[in-house]
Amino acid sequence: MLDWPEKLLFAAAIAQLGLTFGLMVWLGFIRVRLVTAGKVSIGDVALSNEAWPPQATQVSNAANNQFQLPLLFYAVVLLLLWSGITGWPEVVLAWSFVILRFGHAYIHTTMNRVDLRFFVYSAGFFMLLALWLVVALRLFFFSGAV
């Protein structure tokens, strides 16, 4: 049975997964609507994404971005759950990362201000880096045999 820190860490991973699936479903609806309305031809997008209009491209880019930093997030979550060393610092860093990912996706799919998007992306990157550093310190210096 998982303790509260592990449950909250797992919930953060589920929230990140929800963001990924949500963006992918949204993208599917956008693309199907564009094709069925005749605004985009299947032939035009069969080998290239260049024919999609801006909103579809923004959502597509936001969805694709969920397969970059979040993969490192899922890896550290699995490591934490496997090792049994999850504490409150890891939970706070994990949720900070996920909240920043939601913010990044929101910016990406709405106003798409690159400066703001970069700031939020960078903040998430540093949260994830800090999470990995905390885990490394716990594993190498503060845990028993793992």
Image (spheres, helix red, strand yellow):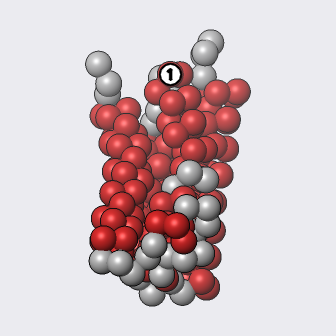
Residue 40 in sight in this render? yes
**Amino acid type of the residue that numbered disc 1 sits on in the rendered structure:** Trp
Residue at coordinates 47% horizontally, 49% vertically from top-left?
A: 94
Q: Residue 37: percent from the left, percent from the top?
A: 30, 77
Residue drawn at x 48%, y 81% is 53
Is 43 left or right of 34, judged from the image as shown? right
Between 14 and 21, the residue placed more toward the observer is 21
Task: Count the numbered circles shown.
Answer: 1
The local crowd at label 1, few if under 14, some if 14 to 19, many if 20 or more residues have their Cα within 10 Å, is few
Looking at the image, residue 23 lies above or below residue 7: below
Question: Residue 114 appears at what percent x and percent y?
Answer: 60, 83
Q: Looking at the image, is 130 positioned above or below residue 103?
A: above
Could one spot residue 19 in this view of the protein?
no
Element on which disc 1 rests: helix
Q: Is residue 4 left or right of residue 92?
A: left
Please provide percent x and percent y for residue 3.
32, 28
Q: Residue at x 62, y 32 (%)?
A: 138
User: Residue 118's image quarter?
Assistant: bottom right
- Residue on which the image places disc 1: 82
Q: Is the N terminus in the top left, top right, bottom left or bottom right quadrant?
A: top left
In this view, 90 is above or below 80:
below
> Which quarter of the rendered picture does the C terminus lie within?
top right
Q: Position of residue 81 (x, y in %)?
A: 46, 27
